Image (tube, rainbow, N blue to C red):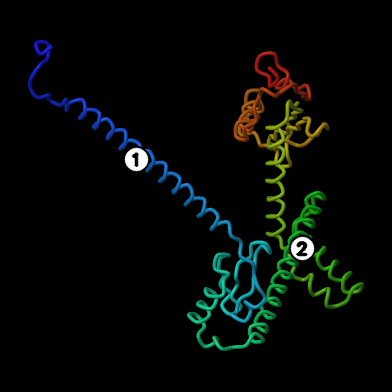
Amino acid sequence: MDLWLKTGSLKRCEKPAVQVDAQSEIVNVTVLVENDNNFSSKSSTSARASDCNKRAVKRKYDEGYLGLGFTWTGSEDYPDALCVVCQKILQNSSVVPAKLKRHLETHHPHLANKSISFFATKLVGIKAMQRIIHSTTTFNDKLLEVSYLVSQRIAMAGEAHTIAEKLIKPSILDAVKILLGESDSKKLESIPLSNNTVSRRIDHMGIYIKYEVCFRLQKCDFFCLQIDESTDVAGLAVLLAFVRYAYEGDIQEDLLMCKTLPTYTTGEEIFRALDSFMSENEITWEKFMGVCTDGAKSMTGSVKGVVT
């Protein structure tokens, strides 16, 4: 049996052990890195969630804050703080006693020891001023509306613009003075109805009507035209175009354009004026369904007419 036994010291196989240890260290390091990443991502997510929760906090206004010189403004559910002394507005995040007191002691140190009744008097003055501003703004809006309505009447009647200041306004003042009294009559003296004002109001209404008609033509499914060439009082050639279209389930008819022809009244010039208007207002010819004319040669010619 001794012949079959090997003598000598046994050597340890350190290489596989090193490999195993190295692999185990790699695995351990990988696990640690993954755990660290997961922890950092979870911590960042929780941090963002906590930040969102902090931002989502809605602070309520307390009546006791008036003793610090502040009332509330804006939304009742998410109010901001309004200083009754300098009318400075602080955000909802500042609606806390410490920040409100710091504002009072920093910007108004001479009022730091005032009682709540002093700031209540300031608040009454602010509310009265707000009511005056609101009533004045509302009254001015009504005066503006009256000015536009009178200008519309003048334009529809085709009267001179000076008739508003010379006839219409004095008649209104006389009627109100007799029926309602002198004080109400004086309120209407500020209605803007001068010659230039009426002209400007009519121009504004014309621009709005043109914009509205063009907007409807851009949205409708189809439209038809009725065109006619005429002359004005100065003898200049004028192109009139009426449009008929479907809008909100009903057939509408409006004046599309009234344009002076620059040169001759040929079919080419008439179509060029009409096409340029369509291009300027972004109205496509693909929705065009038909045309009606007065039967003139320039309109219905088989070679150069507008219809051709």
What crowding class fits label 1: few (fewer than 14 Cα within 10 Å), some (14-19), or many (20 or more)? few
Image x and y of residue 114, in percent:
59, 88
Q: Going from the N terminus, do you reach mark 2 or mark 1 first?
A: 1
Which residue is disc 1 drawn over? 32
Label 2 amino acid? Answer: Lys
In which quadrant of the rendered view does residue 280 lie?
Answer: top right
* Residue drawn where x is 62% and y is 88% of the image: 115
Q: Position of residue 140 (x, y in %)?
A: 72, 66
Q: CA distance from mark 2 to mark 1?
A: 74 Å
Q: Is residue 44 left or right of residue 185?
A: left
- Residue 33 location in percent, x, y? 34, 39
Residue 51 numbered mark, or none: none
When asked about the image quadrant of residue 12, the answer is: top left
Quadrant position of the C terminus in the picture: top right
Q: Residue at x 28, y 32 (%)?
A: 24
Q: Is residue 143 left or right of residue 126?
A: right
Identify the secondary structure beneath mark 2.
helix
Residue 165 higher or lower than 112, as above or below: above
